[in-house]
């Protein structure tokens, strides 16, 4: 089965840019790897509805992100990498952050494959507005604090915390992802 990198981080922490950079770096004639980037169900939801989700819609977004990840894992080759931007865990974190609802946390943690590599994108890059899906640097910092308090201590995965420029982040992941 392909290796899997699950991206975690608050808004505007470079998850999507890192996922795209990994795909560009690894999918070339020199390396035999194929890369599958799992898109963000939350982004699709906000584009489709033109609003952020309500509390009762969080579980469906989590399920959708989980299904997209599973489908990518099942269709990837052994010589490949699946990059999930972001991990389904992020929906559970956002439920705590925005709705004070931790009902998705246990399931999200239980369904995280221990063999998946967790890549945590630090909030050390400039924050940029991006329509209705961005709440500001204070929200990004709060997300990071929730990841550190609620998620990272409960994972049994390899965790890579990346920081710095996109090239520095890419190098940090490339040096550790099989």
Image: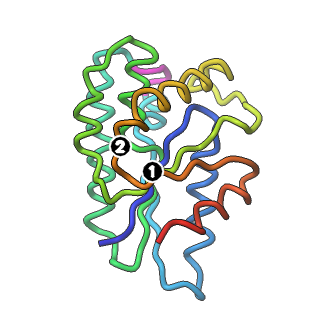
Determine contact: label 1, label 2, CB under 8 Å. Answer: yes
Q: Name the residue nearer the viewer: 108 or 84.
A: 108
Q: Position of residue 37 (x, y in %)?
A: 46, 58
Q: Position of residue 153 (x, y in %)?
A: 40, 36
Which label sits on residue 45? none
The residue that appears at 35% across and 43% down in the rendered structure is 155
Mark 1, residue position: 118
Task: Please tell me whether residue 11 is drawn above or below residue 137 in the rendered image.
Answer: below
Instruction: Count the numbered circles shown.
Output: 2
Nearer-N-terminus badge (1/2): 1
Mark 2, residue position: 155
Q: Main secondary structure of the magenta part?
A: loop
Closer to the camera: disc 1 or disc 2?
2
Among the 4 quarters of the image, the one containing residue 139: top right
Q: Position of residue 5 (x, y in %)?
A: 44, 57
Among the 4 quarters of the image, the one containing residue 2: bottom left
How far apart are labels 1 and 2 at the CA level? 9 Å
Callout 2 environment at 10 Å: few (<14), some (14 to 19), or many (20+)?
Answer: some
Task: Please tell me whether residue 154 is drawn above or below residue 172 in the rendered image.
Answer: above
Task: Please tell me whether residue 21 is drawn above or below residue 152 in the rendered image.
Answer: below
The residue that appears at 49% across and 85% down in the rendered structure is 32
- Which region shows up in magenta? 49-53
Callout 1 environment at 10 Å: few (<14), some (14 to 19), or many (20+)?
Answer: many
Among the 4 quarters of the image, the one containing residue 28: bottom right
């Amino acid at each position: 089965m392909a290796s899997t990198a699950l991206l975690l981080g608050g808004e505007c922490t470079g998850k999507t840019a890192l996922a795209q950079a990994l795909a560009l770096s690894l999918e070339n004639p020199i390396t035999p790897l194929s890369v599958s980037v799992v898109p963000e169900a939350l982004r699709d939801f906000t584009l489709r509805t033109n609003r952020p989700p309500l509390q009762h819609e969080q579980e469906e977004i989590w399920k959708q992100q989980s299904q997209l990840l599973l489908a990518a894992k099942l269709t990837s080759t052994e010589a490949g990498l699946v990059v999930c931007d972001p991990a389904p865990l992020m929906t559970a974190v956002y439920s705590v952050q925005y709705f004070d609802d931790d009902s998705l946390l246990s399931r999200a943690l239980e369904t995280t494959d221990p063999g998946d590599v967790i890549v945590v994108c630090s909030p050390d890059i400039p924050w940029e507005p991006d329509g209705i899906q961005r709440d500001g640097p204070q929200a990004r910092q709060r997300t990071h604090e929730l990841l550190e308090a609620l998620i990272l201590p409960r994972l049994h995965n390899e965790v890579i915390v990346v920081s710095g420029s996109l090239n520095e982040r890419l190098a940090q992941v490339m040096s550790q992802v099989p």
